[in-house]
């Protein structure tokens, strides 16, 4: 509500402020001179007068115009509330003449006072009084209805009253601006925006009063939005443009939503046929025309706004035309029809329309195409994942059609027969319409994916025979691999080829012949693709994986049990090891070896129920690992080979019913000791604990535990002899590990043999003998403490000189 004064008044204010600034500048210069003089070194002057600095001035917390606006606003609100209270509550205390006199006088006074106030320079006060006058006109209208027309239609009277108020307020604002002269040609700010706000109601209230249906009310909303749009685009007053723009967006959005709902329900059971869809389409086209008109007037100053309006107009156009198609075409062709309308929007790209409008229509077309593609996703998902259900019905018989093959566990999406047409049309648009160098590769990739989805869903959508579906997916896999060219991104085609091949493999599980044929063809296809540059890291493992699946299928076809099929599966790890030895590219070698390892684990898993066959398979896997470890860069696989051999031996012993722990530990100990001896020969500085410790512990410790639980004499005797031999070897060669381990086991074994006799002796002695013996031992130890220390040192020195 802060007003801008006329030029003469503003010049006077500026002169006053400049005089105040000059006076303030004089004061500050005087203060500066005093400070400069005070800072100069000078002789101290006794009793020199010292100036006292002035206290800082208080800063106001608000501005004068702000206080003014708050006071005027509160005053206007209080007067308006008082007027409402007088009109509603105290109306009955006056007669007809008194009522008319009071309201008329107050209203004319409130509407006429702003003229005098503005001429005196009180524009903000004039705005407040004018607002009170506008509120009084509303009360006048209400009073007229209560007194003169109490039995008339309320909605109709409200429509007439809102139209009248809009006209009166607009005329008042324009007339007041003309009366105030050229210095104030803009008039007051409040009447014209208020008139625009009141103009939002007449058409809507008239339609409601006439009992019109939803189409008429929607038309009233859209016509009001068109009126607001024209005001927002043509009037120079900013406040009027803002209110008109808010009305245009509000009424236009409400009307567009209502028209869209009418179009959606036009083909329902309660609709009246194509005529209802045509009426809804006309309303949607009216809304689109409003958007296009606004975009055409704003594309220069506000290109982003014009683009958004053109986008909305394009979508409304497609919605309207699609509603007509939906009511006249079968349900399967509703989405394709809307898609054709959306693609037709791209025709404006070659016209002379402004760039913002063309961009908005292009975005609208892209949005329609994206929605159409999303509509096809359920059908694509069923075609891709539906064949997984055949894992529970392997070789139960081929179905009649491709749709039956993919809907074994899930239903086919309704009205999806035209999904291939939608996918193929969008793919063609991407190829033809996107020509820029920046987006061309992404467009080609998207077109490739959509074409792949078309081929995937086509057999099921058209209900083609089952074998045709197999053939189409096979050709799609071949085509996807062929599209992996060096000039194009290779990851999307490879991924599509893998997805298609997996779906084809599951789809072939319907019959034995189809499974064997498809798996063999896929293994050969990916093996051939692996020879192409850049495809080996994916194609070679895929070929080995399908070869593994083929081996399992062949075993099942021959009626072999799983343990015998495992021998056939081992062919894949052998082939992977031989292939990896010939490859020089690490990016291909590692995936090939990993796939071979997985196939070996599968073979081991197939033989878990048959220990003799499990031992054989473990041995063969050990042979494969040992052969791989021969390569210089795969020495570490030798540990896996040794572990596999040991596991094979243990499984074989368990199958024979061997219960002696030495039968399991000696096959590990002997190779470990041999490896330790070889290492000590190559590296004399290697510790005996590293070379011989693991091998000796593997045999001596389990045998010691078994000897302590054995009641016979043979095992302890053999264990003691072996421990004695190890101890003597360690003493002979001065090796710490054999000496300590052999001596410890020998001592514990001897203690085990003497334990029964010690128990008998302890039971025969009196209870005081053990404490006495302990005391004697302690005395003996204490008496010879120094000698024992020297002996311990001597033993430590001897052990230290050993290796």
Image (cartoon, rainbow, N blue to C red):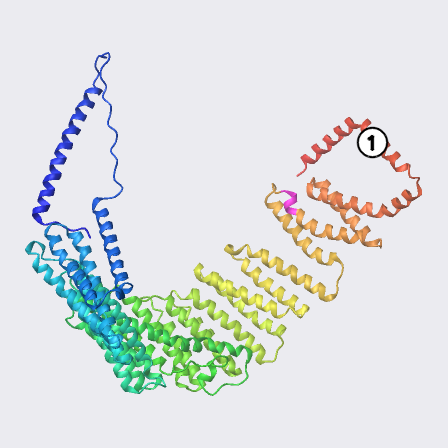
Quick check: 696 left or right of 14?
right
Q: Quadrant of residue 54?
A: top left
For the residue pair 621 and 434, the one nearer the viewer reads as 434
On-image quarter of the C terminus? top right
One can see residue 435 in this view: no
Query: Residue 34 location in percent, x, y?
Result: 18, 22
Secondary structure under the numbered disc 1 in the rendered image: helix
Residue marked by disc 1: 778
Asked if the magenta segment contains residue 238, the reply would be no
Query: Residue 578 location in percent, x, y?
Result: 51, 65
Q: Quadrant of residue 370?
A: bottom left
- Total marks drawn? 1
One can see residue 630 in this view: yes
Quick check: 749 left or right of 538?
right
Quick check: 336 left or right of 734?
left
Query: Residue 745 location in percent, x, y?
Result: 76, 46
Q: Is residue 185 above or below residue 434?
A: above
Residue segment shown in magenta: 687-691
For the residue pair 413 and 14, the one nearer the viewer reads as 14
Q: Is residue 51 above or below residue 663?
A: above
Q: What residue is shown at x 83% (from left), y 31% (from top)?
A: 778
In the current view of this chain or complex, which residue is farthest to the left? 182
Q: Is residue 20 above or below residue 120?
A: above
Query: Residue 109 location in percent, x, y?
Result: 15, 59
Rate crowding at label 1 as few (under 14), some (14 to 19) or many (20 or more) other CA atoms within 10 Å: few
Magenta stretch: helix, strand or loop mostly: helix
């Amino acid at each position: 509500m802060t007003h801008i004064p006329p030029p003469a008044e503003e010049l006077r204010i500026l002169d006053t402020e400049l005089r105040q600034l000059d006076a303030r500048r004089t004061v500050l210069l005087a203060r500066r001179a005093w400070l400069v003089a005070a800072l100069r070194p000078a002789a101290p002057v006794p009793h020199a007068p010292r100036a006292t600095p002035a206290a800082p001035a208080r800063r106001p917390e608000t501005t004068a115009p702000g206080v003014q606006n708050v006071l005027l606003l509160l005053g206007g609100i209080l007067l308006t509330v008082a007027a409402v209270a007088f009109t509603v509550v105290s109306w009955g205390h006056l007669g007809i003449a008194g009522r008319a006199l009071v309201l008329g006088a107050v209203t004319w006074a409130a509407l006429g006072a702003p003229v005098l106030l503005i001429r005196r320079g009180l524009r903000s006060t004039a705005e407040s009084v004018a607002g009170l006058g506008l509120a009084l006109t509303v009360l006048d209208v209400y009073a007229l209805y209560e007194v003169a027309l109490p039995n008339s239609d309320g909605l109709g009277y409200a429509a007439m009253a809102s139209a009248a108020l809009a006209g009166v307020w607009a005329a008042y604002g324009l007339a007041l601006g003309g009366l105030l002269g050229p210095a104030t040609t803009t008039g007051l700010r409040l009447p014209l925006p208020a008139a625009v706000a009141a103009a939002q109601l007449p058409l809507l209230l008239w339609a409601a009063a006439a009992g019109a249906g939803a189409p008429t009310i929607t038309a009233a909303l859209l016509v009001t939005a068109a009126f607001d749009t024209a005001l927002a685009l043509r009037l120079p007053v900013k406040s009027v443009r803002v209110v008109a723009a808010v009305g245009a967006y509000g009424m236009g959005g409400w009307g567009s939503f209502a028209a869209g709902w009418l179009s959606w329900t036009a083909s329902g059971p309660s609709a009246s046929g194509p005529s209802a869809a045509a009426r809804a389409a006309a309303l949607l086209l009216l809304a689109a025309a409003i958007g296009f008109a606004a975009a055409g007037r704003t594309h220069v100053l506000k290109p982003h706004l014009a683009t958004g309006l053109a986008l909305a107009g394009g979508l409304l156009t497609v919605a309207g035309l699609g509603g007509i198609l939906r009511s006249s075409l079968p349900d399967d062709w509703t989405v394709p029809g809307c898609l054709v309308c959306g693609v037709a929007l791209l025709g404006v790209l070659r016209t002379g329309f402004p760039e913002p409008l063309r961009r908005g229509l292009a975005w609208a077309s892209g949005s329609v195409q994206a929605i159409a593609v999303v509509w096809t996703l359920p059908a694509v998902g069923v075609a891709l994942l539906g064949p997984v259900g055949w894992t529970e019905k392997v070789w139960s018989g081929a179905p009649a059609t491709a749709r039956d093959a993919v809907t074994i566990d899930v239903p086919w999406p309704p009205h999806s027969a035209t999904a291939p047409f939608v996918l193929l049309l969008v793919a063609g648009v991407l190829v033809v319409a996107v020509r820029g160098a920046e987006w061309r590769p992404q467009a080609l990739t998207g077109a490739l994916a959509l074409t792949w989805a078309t081929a995937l869903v086509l057999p099921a959508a058209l209900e083609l025979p089952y074998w045709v579906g197999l053939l189409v997916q096979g050709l799609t896999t071949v085509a996807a691999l062929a599209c992996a060219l060096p000039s194009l991104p290779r990851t999307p085609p490879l991924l599509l080829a893998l997805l298609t091949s997996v779906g084809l493999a599951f789809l072939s599980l319907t019959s034995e012949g189809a499974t064997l044929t498809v798996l063999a063809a896929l293994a050969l296809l990916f093996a051939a693709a692996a020879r192409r540059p850049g495809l080996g890291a994916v194609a070679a493992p895929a070929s080995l994986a399908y070869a593994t699946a083929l081996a399992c299928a062949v075993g099942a076809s021959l009626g072999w049990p799983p343990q015998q099929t495992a021998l056939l599966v081992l062919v894949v790890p052998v082939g992977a090891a031989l292939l990896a030895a010939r490859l020089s590219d690490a990016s291909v070698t590692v995936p090939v070896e990993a796939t071979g390892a997985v196939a070996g684990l599968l073979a081991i898993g197939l033989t878990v129920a048959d220990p003799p066959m499990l031992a054989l398979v473990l041995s063969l896997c050990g042979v494969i690992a040992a052969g791989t470890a021969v390569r210089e860069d795969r020495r570490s696989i030798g540990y896996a080979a040794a572990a596999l051999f040991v596991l094979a031996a243990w499984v074989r012993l368990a199958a024979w019913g061997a219960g002696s722990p030495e039968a399991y530990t000696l096959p590990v100990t002997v190779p470990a000791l041999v490896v330790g001896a070889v290492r000590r020969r190559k590296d004399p500085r290697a510790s005996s604990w590293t070379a011989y410790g693991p091998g000796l512990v593997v045999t001596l410790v389990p045998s010691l535990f078994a000897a302590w639980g054995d009641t016979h004499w043979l095992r302890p005797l053999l264990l003691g002899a072996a421990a004695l031999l190890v101890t003597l070897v360690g003493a002979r060669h001065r090796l710490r590990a054999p000496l300590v381990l052999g001596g410890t086991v020998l001592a514990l074994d001897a203690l085990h043999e003497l334990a029964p006799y010690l128990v008998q002796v302890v039971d025969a002695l009196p209870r005081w003998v053990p404490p006495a013996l302990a005391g004697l031992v302690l005395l003996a130890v204490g008496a010879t403490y120094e000698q024992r220390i020297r002996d311990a040192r001597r033993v430590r020195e001897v052990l230290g000189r050993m290796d």
